[in-house]
Image (cartoon, grey):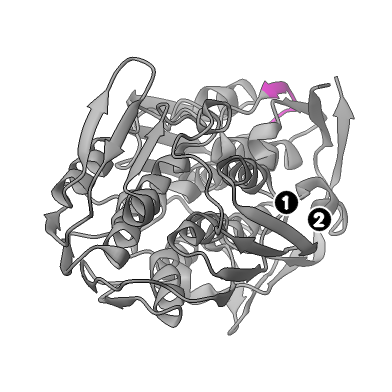
Amino acid sequence: MMKESFLIKGGNILKGEIEVRGAKNAALKVFIASVLTDQEWLVSNVPEIGDIAITIELLKDLGLKIERIKKGVYKIQAKDIKKEELNPKWVQKIRTSIILAGPMLARFGKIRLAYPGGCFIGKRPIDLFLEGLMAFGARFKGDQKGFSLETKGLKGATFVFPQISVTATECLIMAGVLAKGKTVLKNAAMEPEIISLAEFLNNCGAKIRGAGTSEIIIEGVKSLTKGSYKVIPDRIETGTFAILSALTKGEVKIINCCPEHLEVVWTILKKSRVNFEIGKDFVLVKPSHNLKPVNVVTHEYPGFPTDLQPPLTVLLTQAKGLSLIRETIFEGRLFYTDMLNQMGANIIMCDPHRIVVQGPSKLFGRRIVSPDIRAGISLLIAALISQGESVIENIEQIDRGYEKIEERLQKIGAEIKRISA
C-alpha cells in the first residue's frame, strides 16, 4: 500500500463553518459493547476514521455481522460469535481491543488475545483491566505471545481503581452488566462518553447507576435487547477546531458540537484571550489577537483533557510570554514538542512531564512525521500557521482519529492536500 502525506501551505485565514463528527471514543465502545447481546443494534453518527475501520475488521473476524447502511450508519449483530481468540493482526493495531475482554467474558466466559497495540504514548499498561476482571472471578494465563481469561460465570464485585482509567472503567461496566449480582466501581472515570454508553446500555435493559460520578453501581441482568444509538459529538475535535480557528485569525463556526463537555477548556482559552462565543450546539471563534500565556495541568474529566494538550501547546507558541504545561496522564506525551522546535517554536522540556513554552514564535514549514493521533493533528495545525510549505508523513495516525480532515479544512480555506509518497 502506497504511503500518503499531507502537503500544506501555511498562512491562510480560515473562515466558514466546520462540522464536528461523532466521538471516536464513544463509537468504538458501542461497537465493542455489541458483543454483549445477540440482538441487532443500529448505530448512527459514526465517524469514518481509521480506528473504526480496524475495530470493524476485528469484530467481523470474531463473527459479528456489521453492515454499513449509509455514511455514518451501521447495523451490528453479534449473533454468531465463532471463536474466542482475537486476530493478532487487528489487536496489535488498536489498544481499545483490550476492552473486548469485558463483554466476551460476560457473555461467553473466555477470551484470548495478543497484547494490544495502537499509537505509542508511554507504557499504557493493561494491569487495571486484568485486576478488575479477576475481581469478577476471571482466571488469567499469560505468555510472551499474549494472554487468556476464562470464567464459569462472572460475579458482581466491588473494585476500587487505584488510578482513574476511562477504558478500564468502560471495560468493567460491560463486564458488570451481565455479571451475577451487584457490582460497585469506585474511583471510576467520569467522561461524557461513559455517561453516553451507560445511558444506551440502560435503554437496552442494563441496570447502571452513577455513570458520570466516581462511583458506578451495576445490577447484573440476564440479557440485553436490541437498540439504536446516536454517537455523541466529539469533544476533542470540537476543542481542536476552536484552537485551530483562533490561531488562523479568521471567523469559524464549529457546528453540531456539545460545548458543555469542554467547560475547563473554555476557561483556559478565555484566560489566553481567545475570542469566541458559545451556543447550545455551536462555538463561534472570532479573530483573536494578543494571545496571553497560561499554565495548564492535564487531568481526568472534568479537568483539561490530555488529548487537547498538544493543540494547546501550538496555541501557546503564539502567546506573548512563558507558559507552563504539565502532562499528568500519559508518559512520554510531550516528545512531539521537538518537532515544533524544528519548525521554530521555543519549547524547553523540563522533564518528561513538563514543558515551558516561550512565545510568540514564528513557525516555518518543514517535513515532519506524525507520531500519534493528537500530536499529528497538532503538527498539522502548526503547519497551517507556518510560513512556507510543510509535508506531514505517517498521516494514517491522523486518519485514525479525524475523518477526511483535509477535505473539511479545504472548505474553510486551508491549503492542504493529500499526496502519495
Identify which residue, 56 or 24, lies in the foreground.
56
Q: Where are the magenta residues, as a range?
A: 362-368
Q: Are marks 2 and 1 in contact (CB under 8 Å)?
A: yes
Label 1 crowd (10 A; few <14 / some 14-19 / many >=20): some
Label 2 crowd (10 A; few <14 / some 14-19 / many >=20): some
Tell whether 393 sits left or right of 141: right
**Residue 403 - label:** 1
Q: Position of residue 387 (x, y in %)?
A: 78, 33
Q: Which residue is mark 2?
A: 408
Decide: is 291 above or below 335: below
Tell whether 369 sits left or right of 108: right
Residue 143 sits inside the magenta stretch: no
**Residue 170 - label:** none
Q: Secondary structure at mark 2?
A: helix
Q: Secondary structure at mark 1?
A: loop
First along the sequence among labels 2 and 1 = 1
